[in-house]
Image (tube, rainbow, N blue to C red):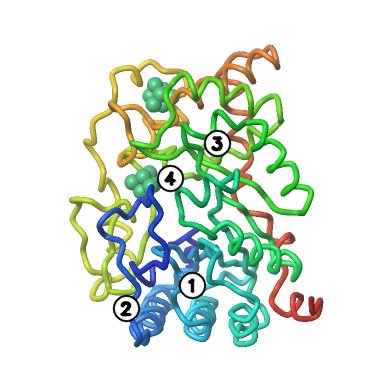
Amino acid sequence: MTIIISEILFEPTFECNLRCKYCYLGNARKQRRTTDWSYVTDAARRLTDKFLAEDYRVRNVLYHGAEVTVLPPEVLADVCNIFDEIAPDDYGFQAIQTNGTLITPEYIETFESRLHDGIRLHYSISVDSPEKFNDTMRGRGTYEKAMANARNLLKKGYPVHLFGCFTPEMFAHLDDMKSWIQARQAEGFIWKFQIASAPFNLSDEQQVKLAYWLDENDWIRRFNTLVPEMCGNFGNECDVNHFCADGLYPPCDRQTGEIVPLWLDKPVSRLLEMRQGAFAGTPTSPQCQYCPVRPVCHSGCPKFRVDGRAVDCMLKKTIYRIRANKLGIPMHKAIKLYQGTSNFNPPNDGIPTIAEIRRKGA
Ligand code: SF4
Ligand code: SF4
């Protein structure tokens, strides 16, 4: 019987063209050096064959980090075409997480020209606002490049998420941020955000302020942690399947100190089993024990805790309190309401096929 997995992450490289200050990869991030990328297509082929042989299908293949688009467009297209073979019959889609600086119209033209007609693809571009914060964290000129490329994708008809990271410095500029977000949403972008990890994380006080600001602007749903299937909501029981093209099968891309087995020689069923409980026993705060938010937080991502609490603990608590008060219902009911539907990925109908994008011909 076919088993459908909701998502896998495929990491083709640890190389990146940028040096962002808050990069989650730390010392694992590499400079651009590779010229022969055949190992990536070989890995995609080998992994896809494993899934097919054991009758697994994958709803969403997410290409992630360090920077996927350091791959030549021809290679990235070949990889997408290979993984398209494990899309379920009813629907499947792929997503590219990128800093957006390398996906010029020329890159996209070559990439798209090689993709299979039936592939559905969306982009998630990491960009911060206001512009000067983006460039401080990610490098001068990166905002302008990323946004120009993002607009090209939007014009072509792809769903484009702009994914930002809140840091303490942004608090003096909430009005600027508000105008920026409103303007981007009016253009057709889907804005989403998370809170930066330590040492760029927000204090409890700032998180409370942010929660009220989000509520005022009706942007609570833009907060990625409220997405039911977000791995961080499962705490130490998080369960992400992350395959690196070099053969590693780390429990997560936040890999530091964990055992990192190879996927090359193991069946998929065994790998999924091995991933279970990879973070069991990671310490949590005593505060979490009787916290009403615990059922949907579980102390958050085990790699990004501050004193045993989720990096966005106070933001979550405040958001649910605000919603419960407004609706006049108990907090546990407000939590259920907010966890009821996912807003992480656009519905299938919202992602056009490559054939449809080509027909549009923008
Ligand atoms: S360690 Fe954190 S980011 Fe990684 S899979 Fe677990 S919850 Fe997700
Ligand atoms: S919201 Fe905070 S206190 Fe509650 S479970 Fe999550 S991290 Fe713990």
Dot placed on the residue nearer the N-terminal end, 4 or 1: 1
**Badge 2: residue crowd in 10 Å (few <14, some 14–19, many ≥20):** few
Mark 1: secondary structure: helix
**Amino acid at dot 2:** Arg
Quarter of image, res 111? bottom right
For the residues marked 4 and 3, what is the alpha-carbon distance in whole angstroms? 11 Å
Q: Which residue is mark 1?
A: 69
Quarter of image, res 150? bottom right
Q: Position of residue 297 (x, y in %)?
A: 43, 31
Callout 2: CB less than 8 Å from ligand 1: no
**Amino acid at dot 4:** Cys
**Amino acid at dot 1:** Thr
Mark 4: secondary structure: helix
Callout 3: CB less than 8 Å from ligand 2: no
For the residues marked 3 and 2, what is the alpha-carbon distance in whole angstroms? 38 Å
Front-most of residues 245 and 31: 31
For the residues marked 4 and 1, what is the alpha-carbon distance in whole angstroms? 24 Å
Task: Please give the name of the residue rendered at 68% of the width and 68% of the height, measured from the top-left corner.
Answer: 153
For the residues marked 2 and 4, what is the alpha-carbon distance in whole angstroms? 32 Å
